[in-house]
Image: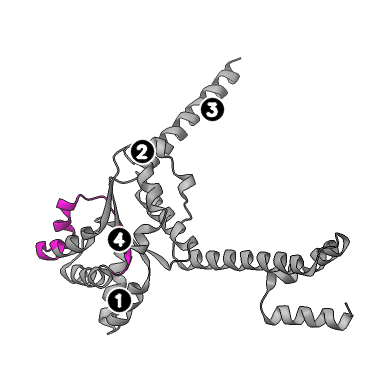
Amino acid sequence: MSEFTYERLRENLERLKMKNTLEILDNYLEQALKDNVNVVEILDHIFLEEAKSKTKRAVEKQIQMSGFPMKKTMADFDFSFQPSIDKRQIDELCTMRFIENAENIVFLGPPGVGKTHLATALGMETAKHRFSTYYINCHTLIEQLKKAHFENHLPDKLRALGRYKLLIIDEIGYLPMDIQGANLFFQLIARRYEKASTIFTSNKTFSQWNDIFADVTIAAAVLDRVLHHCTVIHIKGESYRLKERKEFMKQKVQVTNTLFEKAST
């Protein structure tokens, strides 16, 4: 291969934005020539690696744009600590059939039992499957909808939130909504109803949602649409945060006792 041809090859790879091929080209071609690899095998390997690299970058970008407050995976979740959760049910959700069927998921339970972890982990799986995903705290969502309404941009905001294949609305019920917030929330749920999937997390039972939305009629209308095509997962158990606090205190006591014993001898 002439130097001119080689430089033109690199220029075309840059123009085509084949970054991974540019990185591996020199070493791989040198090894391929030593091993007497034919042209088809060379092209197959290069394009396979380029496709893998592009997919990886696309997934990383999707996750970055999803707004997750933290990166949590299913592998990080301690199912043994929360025996009330059926792992087979979670595994089924990870197949993404709920996305394809535009079904919802609701995680209910007291603070600290892993609702946000599971919602985020499912969102990460969804993003890895290249479905558009977005996470938002419920209070932040209401504030954004109110701002859009005040600035006469509500239709645009609802349209943007309606496009996501998966929307995760976290911590419903931690802060109450006024009647305007409840109305705006209903408009969003109605827009996404039977068109796209939404994951909700809440520390309140469904019977307490009347108090969250400040209006029985709106609460009933929201629940009707949320639960029509929905998997509800009730989590009963100890708080992970309390567990970690107990373990920390236990370790602290052990260290203190050890130091005391050493000082006494």
Disc 1 vs disc 3: Cβ atoms closer than 8 Å? no
Tell me if mark 3 has few (under 14), some (14-19) or many (20+) residues whose alpha carbon lies within 10 angstroms of its own.
Answer: few
| Residue at 45% over, 33% down | 247
Q: Secondary structure at mark 4?
A: loop
Find residue 126 and report its horizontal and vertical position in percent. Answer: 44, 60
Q: Which residue is mark 3?
A: 255
Q: Tell me the residue at 53%/27% (across/down).
A: 255
Amino acid type of the residue that numbered disc 2 sits on in the rendered structure = Gln
The three-letter amino acid code for the residue at tag 4 is Glu
Separation of disc 3 and disc 2 at Cα?
29 Å
Q: Quadrant of residue 242?
A: top left
Horizontally, residue 26 falls left or right of residue 231, namely: right
Q: In the shown orientation, is residue 265 left or right of residue 72?
A: right
Check whether the beta carbons of the residues at disc 1 and disc 4 lie within 8 A of each other: no
Q: Three-letter amino acid code at disc 1?
A: Leu
Front position in the image: 159 or 50: 50
Which mark, by number, is residue 158? Answer: 1
Mark before the other along the chain sequence, 2 or 1: 2
According to the picture, the residue beneath numbered tag 4 turns out to be 103
SS at mark 3 in the image: helix
- The quadrant of the rendering that contains the C terminus is top right
Span colored in magenta: 195-220
Residue bearing mark 2: 82
**Residue 213 is one of the magenta-drawn residues:** yes
Marks 3 and 2 close (CB-CB < 8 Å): no
Res 69 visible: no
Find numbered disc 2 in the image and state the secondary structure of the residue it sits on.
Answer: loop
Instruction: Please state which of the two labelled residues, at mark 3 or mark 2, is closer to the viewer.
Output: 2
Q: Label 3 sits on what residue type?
A: Val
Q: Residue at x 34, y 73 (%)?
A: 161
Q: Position of residue 254 (x, y in %)?
A: 51, 25
Identify the mark nearer the N-term, 3 or 4: 4
